[in-house]
Image (cartoon, coloured by chain):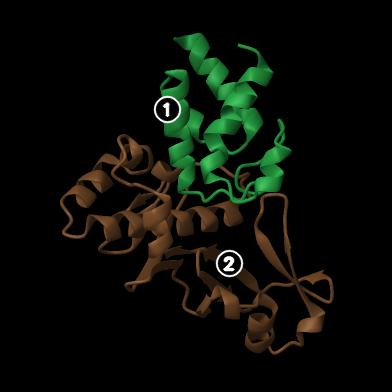
Chain colours: A brown, B green
Amino acid sequence: MIGNDIIDLNLASAQSDWKRKGWLQKICTKHEQSYVLNSEKPFLSVWQLWSMKESAYKAEQRIYQLVPKFNPKSFECNIVSGKIVSNKQTYHTRSTITKDYIHTYTYNSNQEIAIQKLDNSNTLIFLEKKLNIPKSRLSIKKDSNNIPHIYIDDKLSNNVISISHHGKYRAYNLLKT
Amino acid sequence: MKNETMIEQLKTIIKPYVENEEQWNNLNDETDFIKDLDINSANLVDIVLDIEDAFEIEIDNDAMEKMLNVKASIEVIKQKIAEK
Protein backbone atom coordinates (compact mmCIF):
# COMPACT_ATOMS: atom_id res chain seq x y z
CA MET A 1 0.00 0.00 0.00
CA ILE A 2 1.29 3.41 -0.85
CA GLY A 3 0.30 7.01 -0.17
CA ASN A 4 2.11 10.13 0.88
CA ASP A 5 1.38 13.76 1.57
CA ILE A 6 3.49 16.84 2.04
CA ILE A 7 2.42 20.11 3.59
CA ASP A 8 4.31 23.35 3.08
CA LEU A 9 3.75 24.90 6.50
CA ASN A 10 4.21 28.49 5.35
CA LEU A 11 1.61 28.04 2.66
CA ALA A 12 -0.73 26.12 4.98
CA SER A 13 -0.77 28.97 7.47
CA ALA A 14 -1.56 31.42 4.67
CA GLN A 15 -4.13 29.21 2.90
CA SER A 16 -6.15 27.90 5.83
CA ASP A 17 -7.31 29.12 9.20
CA TRP A 18 -7.74 25.94 11.21
CA LYS A 19 -9.27 27.97 14.04
CA ARG A 20 -12.17 29.00 11.82
CA LYS A 21 -15.48 28.06 13.42
CA GLY A 22 -16.48 24.55 12.32
CA TRP A 23 -13.24 23.83 10.46
CA LEU A 24 -11.75 21.27 12.83
CA GLN A 25 -15.14 19.61 13.38
CA LYS A 26 -15.50 18.98 9.65
CA ILE A 27 -12.23 17.07 9.29
CA CYS A 28 -11.41 15.62 12.71
CA THR A 29 -13.14 13.03 14.87
CA LYS A 30 -14.00 13.99 18.45
CA HIS A 31 -10.92 12.20 19.72
CA GLU A 32 -8.65 13.99 17.24
CA GLN A 33 -10.22 17.35 18.07
CA SER A 34 -9.46 16.93 21.74
CA TYR A 35 -5.90 15.87 20.91
CA VAL A 36 -5.40 19.08 18.92
CA LEU A 37 -7.00 21.34 21.49
CA ASN A 38 -4.84 19.89 24.27
CA SER A 39 -1.69 19.89 22.19
CA GLU A 40 1.19 22.24 22.99
CA LYS A 41 1.59 22.88 19.29
CA PRO A 42 -1.94 22.73 17.88
CA PHE A 43 -0.95 24.16 14.49
CA LEU A 44 1.53 21.32 13.90
CA SER A 45 -0.90 18.73 15.27
CA VAL A 46 -3.62 19.86 12.87
CA TRP A 47 -1.36 19.60 9.85
CA GLN A 48 0.18 16.33 10.90
CA LEU A 49 -3.31 14.89 11.23
CA TRP A 50 -4.25 16.28 7.85
CA SER A 51 -1.16 14.77 6.15
CA MET A 52 -1.86 11.42 7.85
CA LYS A 53 -5.46 11.46 6.61
CA GLU A 54 -4.38 12.35 3.08
CA SER A 55 -1.74 9.59 2.99
CA ALA A 56 -4.20 6.95 4.14
CA TYR A 57 -6.89 8.27 1.79
CA LYS A 58 -4.52 8.02 -1.17
CA ALA A 59 -3.46 4.50 -0.20
CA GLU A 60 -7.07 3.38 0.23
CA GLN A 61 -8.20 4.98 -3.01
CA ARG A 62 -5.47 3.09 -4.87
CA ILE A 63 -6.06 -0.28 -3.20
CA TYR A 64 -9.82 -0.29 -3.70
CA GLN A 65 -9.87 1.81 -6.92
CA LEU A 66 -12.28 4.25 -5.36
CA VAL A 67 -13.65 7.33 -7.04
CA PRO A 68 -12.46 10.51 -5.30
CA LYS A 69 -14.27 11.40 -2.09
CA PHE A 70 -13.88 14.11 0.51
CA ASN A 71 -14.11 12.08 3.71
CA PRO A 72 -11.28 13.09 6.07
CA LYS A 73 -13.29 12.02 9.12
CA SER A 74 -13.39 8.43 7.88
CA PHE A 75 -9.71 8.07 8.76
CA GLU A 76 -9.18 8.00 12.51
CA CYS A 77 -5.58 8.87 13.30
CA ASN A 78 -3.32 8.26 16.24
CA ILE A 79 -0.55 10.83 16.02
CA VAL A 80 1.68 9.11 18.55
CA SER A 81 1.73 5.67 16.89
CA GLY A 82 1.16 6.81 13.30
CA LYS A 83 -1.68 4.31 13.00
CA ILE A 84 -4.77 5.18 10.97
CA VAL A 85 -7.97 3.18 10.89
CA SER A 86 -10.71 3.37 8.25
CA ASN A 87 -13.72 1.12 7.90
CA LYS A 88 -11.77 -0.89 5.32
CA GLN A 89 -8.23 -1.12 6.59
CA THR A 90 -5.52 -0.14 9.09
CA TYR A 91 -2.60 1.95 7.87
CA HIS A 92 0.80 2.52 9.44
CA THR A 93 2.40 5.84 8.66
CA ARG A 94 5.50 7.78 9.56
CA SER A 95 5.75 11.55 9.65
CA THR A 96 8.69 13.90 9.36
CA ILE A 97 8.20 17.35 10.82
CA THR A 98 10.57 20.23 10.14
CA LYS A 99 10.05 23.96 10.56
CA ASP A 100 9.19 24.16 6.85
CA TYR A 101 7.11 21.10 6.12
CA ILE A 102 5.33 18.01 7.37
CA HIS A 103 5.61 14.85 5.34
CA THR A 104 3.69 11.64 6.04
CA TYR A 105 3.91 8.34 4.17
CA THR A 106 2.43 4.89 4.57
CA TYR A 107 5.14 2.62 5.83
CA ASN A 108 6.49 -0.21 3.66
CA SER A 109 9.74 -2.07 4.25
CA ASN A 110 11.07 -1.69 0.72
CA GLN A 111 10.50 1.84 -0.47
CA GLU A 112 12.16 5.05 -1.54
CA ILE A 113 11.16 8.37 -0.02
CA ALA A 114 12.24 11.70 -1.43
CA ILE A 115 11.38 15.29 -0.69
CA GLN A 116 12.45 17.89 -3.21
CA LYS A 117 12.18 21.61 -3.70
CA LEU A 118 9.71 22.07 -6.52
CA ASP A 119 12.04 24.19 -8.68
CA ASN A 120 14.66 21.38 -8.69
CA SER A 121 12.22 18.55 -8.96
CA ASN A 122 11.49 16.35 -11.93
CA THR A 123 9.57 13.13 -11.49
CA LEU A 124 11.04 11.35 -14.51
CA ILE A 125 14.63 12.17 -13.47
CA PHE A 126 13.84 10.84 -9.99
CA LEU A 127 12.48 7.62 -11.48
CA GLU A 128 15.37 7.31 -13.92
CA LYS A 129 17.79 7.24 -10.97
CA LYS A 130 15.75 5.01 -8.73
CA LEU A 131 14.66 2.47 -11.34
CA ASN A 132 17.82 2.68 -13.41
CA ILE A 133 15.86 3.06 -16.62
CA PRO A 134 16.43 5.97 -19.05
CA LYS A 135 13.78 8.62 -18.65
CA SER A 136 13.01 8.55 -22.37
CA ARG A 137 11.39 5.15 -21.73
CA LEU A 138 9.39 6.34 -18.71
CA SER A 139 6.13 8.18 -18.35
CA ILE A 140 3.55 8.92 -15.65
CA LYS A 141 -0.14 8.79 -16.43
CA LYS A 142 -3.04 9.54 -14.15
CA ASP A 143 -6.07 7.28 -14.28
CA SER A 144 -9.69 8.43 -14.20
CA ASN A 145 -9.53 8.56 -10.38
CA ASN A 146 -6.54 10.92 -10.65
CA ILE A 147 -4.07 8.31 -9.34
CA PRO A 148 -0.61 8.35 -10.95
CA HIS A 149 0.89 5.21 -12.52
CA ILE A 150 4.34 4.51 -13.91
CA TYR A 151 4.67 3.34 -17.50
CA ILE A 152 7.81 1.81 -19.00
CA ASP A 153 7.82 1.78 -22.81
CA ASP A 154 4.11 2.68 -22.62
CA LYS A 155 3.39 -0.44 -20.58
CA LEU A 156 2.00 -0.23 -17.05
CA SER A 157 4.81 -0.97 -14.59
CA ASN A 158 4.56 -2.89 -11.31
CA ASN A 159 6.54 -0.15 -9.60
CA VAL A 160 4.17 2.08 -7.70
CA ILE A 161 4.54 5.78 -6.99
CA SER A 162 2.66 8.26 -4.86
CA ILE A 163 3.33 11.93 -5.60
CA SER A 164 2.41 14.86 -3.40
CA HIS A 165 2.93 18.53 -4.06
CA HIS A 166 2.21 21.57 -1.93
CA GLY A 167 3.76 25.03 -2.14
CA LYS A 168 7.53 24.82 -2.50
CA TYR A 169 7.75 21.05 -2.11
CA ARG A 170 7.17 17.81 -3.92
CA ALA A 171 7.40 14.43 -2.23
CA TYR A 172 7.62 10.91 -3.59
CA ASN A 173 6.94 7.53 -2.14
CA LEU A 174 8.13 4.79 -4.49
CA LEU A 175 7.61 1.08 -4.04
CA LYS A 176 9.92 -0.93 -6.28
CA THR A 177 9.07 -4.42 -7.37
CA MET B 1 -33.62 29.09 -7.01
CA LYS B 2 -32.53 28.48 -10.59
CA ASN B 3 -29.52 26.28 -11.41
CA GLU B 4 -27.70 29.14 -13.15
CA THR B 5 -28.14 31.46 -10.18
CA MET B 6 -26.83 28.75 -7.89
CA ILE B 7 -23.81 28.09 -10.09
CA GLU B 8 -23.03 31.82 -10.18
CA GLN B 9 -23.20 31.99 -6.39
CA LEU B 10 -21.01 28.90 -6.07
CA LYS B 11 -18.54 30.40 -8.53
CA THR B 12 -18.14 33.46 -6.30
CA ILE B 13 -17.71 31.30 -3.20
CA ILE B 14 -14.91 29.18 -4.61
CA LYS B 15 -12.99 32.02 -6.32
CA PRO B 16 -10.64 32.79 -3.37
CA TYR B 17 -9.39 29.18 -3.33
CA VAL B 18 -8.90 28.70 -7.06
CA GLU B 19 -5.36 28.31 -8.43
CA ASN B 20 -6.41 27.98 -12.07
CA GLU B 21 -8.17 31.20 -13.05
CA GLU B 22 -8.69 30.22 -16.70
CA GLN B 23 -10.63 27.09 -15.76
CA TRP B 24 -12.60 29.12 -13.23
CA ASN B 25 -13.72 31.48 -16.00
CA ASN B 26 -15.00 28.47 -17.94
CA LEU B 27 -16.63 26.88 -14.91
CA ASN B 28 -19.56 24.59 -15.67
CA ASP B 29 -21.49 21.65 -14.26
CA GLU B 30 -18.66 19.20 -14.91
CA THR B 31 -15.87 21.28 -13.34
CA ASP B 32 -13.88 19.36 -10.72
CA PHE B 33 -12.54 21.42 -7.80
CA ILE B 34 -9.23 19.61 -7.46
CA LYS B 35 -8.53 18.25 -10.96
CA ASP B 36 -9.64 21.33 -12.92
CA LEU B 37 -9.34 24.28 -10.54
CA ASP B 38 -6.26 23.06 -8.60
CA ILE B 39 -7.96 23.85 -5.31
CA ASN B 40 -5.97 22.61 -2.33
CA SER B 41 -7.82 19.76 -0.65
CA ALA B 42 -7.65 21.44 2.78
CA ASN B 43 -9.53 24.39 1.30
CA LEU B 44 -12.48 22.14 0.43
CA VAL B 45 -13.37 22.48 4.11
CA ASP B 46 -13.55 26.25 3.68
CA ILE B 47 -15.73 25.90 0.61
CA VAL B 48 -18.14 23.65 2.51
CA LEU B 49 -18.26 26.13 5.42
CA ASP B 50 -18.76 29.07 3.05
CA ILE B 51 -21.61 27.21 1.32
CA GLU B 52 -23.23 26.50 4.70
CA ASP B 53 -23.09 30.21 5.54
CA ALA B 54 -24.23 31.48 2.14
CA PHE B 55 -27.21 29.13 1.78
CA GLU B 56 -27.97 28.81 5.51
CA ILE B 57 -27.79 25.04 5.43
CA GLU B 58 -25.95 22.36 7.37
CA ILE B 59 -23.84 19.86 5.47
CA ASP B 60 -23.27 16.48 7.12
CA ASN B 61 -20.37 14.10 6.45
CA ASP B 62 -22.23 11.96 3.94
CA ALA B 63 -23.12 15.00 1.85
CA MET B 64 -19.66 16.58 2.19
CA GLU B 65 -18.07 13.39 0.85
CA LYS B 66 -19.49 14.08 -2.61
CA MET B 67 -18.65 17.78 -2.85
CA LEU B 68 -15.67 17.55 -5.17
CA ASN B 69 -17.26 19.11 -8.23
CA VAL B 70 -19.83 21.70 -9.26
CA LYS B 71 -22.59 19.25 -10.15
CA ALA B 72 -22.48 17.27 -6.90
CA SER B 73 -22.22 20.44 -4.82
CA ILE B 74 -25.30 21.96 -6.48
CA GLU B 75 -27.20 18.72 -5.81
CA VAL B 76 -26.23 18.80 -2.13
CA ILE B 77 -27.22 22.47 -1.79
CA LYS B 78 -30.59 21.82 -3.43
CA GLN B 79 -31.26 18.79 -1.24
CA LYS B 80 -30.32 20.62 1.97
CA ILE B 81 -32.46 23.63 1.05
CA ALA B 82 -35.41 21.30 0.39
CA GLU B 83 -34.92 19.64 3.80
CA LYS B 84 -35.02 22.97 5.65
Q: Residue at x 45, y 67 (%)?
A: A105
Mark 2 touching mark 1, by CB under 8 A?
no
Residue A2 in view here: no
Residue A108 in view: yes
The mark found on residue A172 in the picture is none
Q: Position of residue A117 (x, y in %)?
A: 52, 77
Q: Locate residue A156: give its quadrant.
A: bottom right
Which residue is more in the foreground, A32 or B2? B2
Crowd class of label 2 (few under 14; some 14 to 19; many from 20; radius 10 Å): many
Residue, disc 1: B60
* Residue type beneath disc 2: Ile
Q: How many other residues sit within 10 Å of disc 1, few (<14), some (14-19) or many (≥20)?
A: few
Q: The residue marked by circle 1 belongs to what chain?
A: B
* Same chain for the residues under marks 2 and 1 in the image: no
* Relative horizontal placement of residue B66, taking residue B53 as reference (left or right): right
Q: Position of residue A159 (x, y in %)?
A: 66, 74
Q: Position of residue A177 (x, y in %)?
A: 63, 78
Q: Residue at x 47, y 59 (%)?
A: A55
Q: Position of residue A143 (x, y in %)?
A: 72, 55
The residue under label 2 is: A163
Instruction: Tell me if A136 is positioned left or right of B1 in this view.
Output: right
> Residue at the location (62% across, 86% down)?
A130
Quarter of the picture holding the N terminus of chain B: top right
Tell me which residue sits at (56%, 73%) in the image. A118
In-image side of B36 versus A83 (left or right) = right
For the residue labelled by badge 2, is the local secondary structure a helix, a strand or a loop? strand
- The image shows residue B55, relative to residue A152, as above or below, that is above
Q: Chain of mark 2?
A: A
SS under mark 1: loop
